[in-house]
Image (cartoon, rainbow, N blue to C red):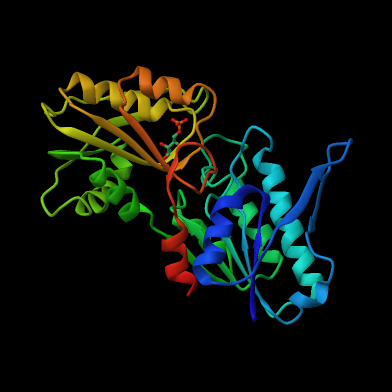
Amino acid sequence: MNKFLIVGPASQMLGVKIAKNLNIPHINTEFKTFPDGENYLRLNLEDETILEGKEIIIVQSTGPSASRDQNSRLFELFMIIDAVKRIGVAKIIIVVPYLAYARQDKIFRPGESEFARVVLRLINSMEIDEFYVVDIHNPDILEELSCKTVNIDSMKILADYIKSSGAKDIVVVSPDKGAVERSKAFAKHFGENVPVDFFEKKRDVKTGEITMSGQLSLENKDIVIADDIIATGGTMSEAIKISKESGANKVYAAATHALMLQNAKYRILAAGGDEIIGTDSIDNELSKVSLADVICDYLK
Ligand code: R5P
């Protein structure tokens, strides 16, 4: 076998699914936090020579969870890359469905760091061969990597899930004017003439507080609100509230990366959301749609 897949601690379900789909062996990791807070990780193998000269696919998302923050997830990724490099493999392909810090892609206030780019520069310094990510917040930052990069689109599989759950008379609503183009592309997966509308969103750069405005004609329509990330649910819950006030029937809250931090689930349901749909870029109970097949289409 010329290929192996390393299942990172943050992507255990997705990693195994991808390995099965590609019909290649998978290896998991042993990981822990030392008493001083440092991360530890080793590949769970006894004979390193099985990886020598092989093509290695590493699957590790870097979103926060109850047991690990995104810094630890990034360090685990670096440790896996370093371990396979030391062993001497032929090729390193990394799949990072959710890239931590991707939203820190611009300078919003004086004195800030454009840290999303720093994360990619660190990955680049490890001399990998290919980098796959899913619906990255700002694809422009991928220019920091000198290897092949692919930003995979999860829109079709999210739309397929929503269609199969019986949504009718759909309007796609963008929670932000800036995301309208993405919402238009998303709407095409529901049919040729599915309308797209949007709200105006403003975020206070100091407090992070969101305000949204707009009045749409959504009477008796099923609404799909799609975003790349649900973090605290502030954006989504505001968009749902206004959709409901505009006459919406059922509201589907869809996101590629459903981080669901703090009271996000409550806020979305309390605002009137009927269903929250995420992918397994984040391994939680809302990962109803698996990215495995679409990622494999690129890896094959
Ligand atoms: C922002 O530009 C993103 O696309 C999302 O709208 C945002 O990250 C969601 O964050 P939250 O759920 O905290 O409003």
Viewer-proximal residue, 77 or 207?
77
Tell me where residue 99 appears, x and y as whole percent: 56, 50
Residue pictured at 31% horizontal, 47% vertical: 161
Tell me where residue 257 appears, x and y as whole percent: 47, 43
| Residue 151 appears in the figure | no
Q: Is residue 61 above or below residue 295?
A: above
Report the side of 41 relative to 154 (left or right).
right
Report the side of 209 relative to 171 (left or right).
right
Q: In which quarter of the image is residue 273?
A: top left
- How many badges with numbers are in the image? 0
| Residue 255 appears in the figure | yes
Viewer-proximal residue, 86 or 106?
86
Image quadrant where one finds the N terminus = bottom right
Q: In which quarter of the image is ligand 1?
A: top left
Residue pictured at 22% horizontal, 49% vertical: 187
Report the side of 285 relative to 222 (left or right).
right
Q: In this view, does 46 lie above or below 96?
A: below
Report the side of 123 relative to 173 (left or right).
right
Q: In which quarter of the image is residue 20?
A: bottom right
Residue pictured at 42% horizontal, 69% vertical: 297
Residue pictured at 62% horizontal, 43% vertical: 113
Tell me where residue 70 appears, x and y as whole percent: 65, 42
Tell me where residue 220 appears, x and y as whole percent: 11, 28
